[in-house]
Amino acid sequence: MRIALFIAASLSAVAVAGPPVAAVRSEEPTIDVPGRSSQTPWAAAEGEFVVVAFGAETAQGKADVFVAVSRDGGARFSEPVRVNAAEGEARLGGELPPRVGLVARGRGEPEIVVAYGAKTQATEIRVARSTDGGRTFAASRALQAAGAGGDRGWHAMALDARGAAHVMWLDHRGLAARAPGHHTETAKPGGGPDSRHMEQAAIDGVAMAERSGLYYARDDGQPPAERELVKGVCYCCKVAMATTPDGGVYAAWRHVFPGSVRDIAFIASSNGGQRFDAPARVSIDNWHLAGCPDDGTAMTVDAHGTAHVVWPTVLSVPDPEGALFYASSSDGQSFTTRVRIPTLGSPKPMHPQMLADAADRVLVAWDEVVNGVRQAAVRRLSFDEAGQPLFGATLRLGSPDTPSSYPFLVSTSRGTLAIYVAGEAGASSIRVEGF
């Protein structure tokens, strides 16, 4: 599988209102993993130190997680290093990317933390760390209880200022034998369980979702103690997480509400994950769907502690049409009224990501099919005096003739990078454009 990372010369601006973002990169370094194809990029940056985590899959379907490191803001990258010790154990997919974060360590290079899905005898969420700049990784460890049955994945990770990794994932062990040794802390968005809810579940299919849960564990050098936070998650949509400047932990996911409505829920902890508040519903979209859309939410927290959330949903009037929506919360409990994000014009924008960058801008990235070709794009949000979002130019990533998807955004001391998958399935690469 061949993986190539490029710093592209420019971003092409789509003709919509607002100023385009000027590209500042011109070099095009590449990273090769012979005989493989690339997917599922994620990234983190601390100053000029940038780490990109990605999946590399063989023609036989075996996958591994790799990282590549830049020490000059993304101009050049090191040779990729495999994260997982057991070859071929990685479990990857568009909604199953490895997550990576950095822990500042004084004058030395930051510690690299990677959370990824693995599948051998069972499915696991594992965390691995590197203290030498990504040259080597210590043995990973699983976050779920030993012997936990069932399926799990679609995880998210956020690091706090002390280097603790807060990880959440979707867990299907309720469909298997109950695993020993795990603690359950169950809540429901909008209130606790009641007989009315269970009656409704019996007739609308929510009962199946009640057997899947949102799980949480903290990896901080002590044995991780997982616990279930919420039942009734929409399985196969990725979770979004972020930490706040004052030590809070936020998460958002797609939940299954009565009637098989697949809307976005949100949960917050103000004390580093020791206790979580009751979940809230971000927006009452009322998207009824008898299945999982495999398309989750994204979130970022700015320097002021405001949580910005973006998610895909489907509008049913007059005809079914996909859309991206944005809302924010300054208190981790209530959200602003949703606002639709203008996209490239297709009926199904997908796979959103968000970034609050060093210049205090909020950026949204996504992909959608335009003229038969999937295209990734970025749009800037600013805010008026009343806090209402204003939308800048939409910037199309890559070439309109080459598929691009699953964009990710990261801020460095030299500017912002957009990282995405380019090319056809089985022969794709990871590209990075700077602006």
Image (spheres, grey):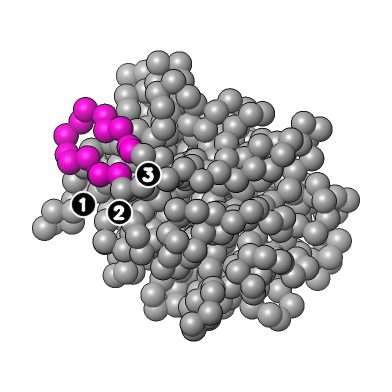
Across and down, in percent, residue 172 comes to 72, 49
Please state which amino acid type lies under the numbered disc 1. Ser
Image: magenta residue range: 10-23
Tell me, yes or no, if residue 260 can be seen here: no
> Quick one: label 1 or label 2, which is nearer the N terminus?
2
Q: Report if residue 11 lies within the magenta region.
A: yes
Provide the residue designation for mark 2: 362
Question: Between marks 3 and 1, how big is the CA–CA gap?
Answer: 27 Å
Compared to residue 164, the image places residue 323 above or below, namely: above
Provide the residue designation for mark 3: 26
Query: Which quadrant of the rendered structure holds the N terminus?
Result: top right
Residue placed most toward the observer, 284 or 63: 63
Provide the residue designation for mark 1: 382
Where on the picture, by quarter, is residue 78? bottom right
Residues at marks 1 and 2 touching, judged by CB atoms closer than 8 Å: yes
Q: Residue furthest bottom?
A: 106
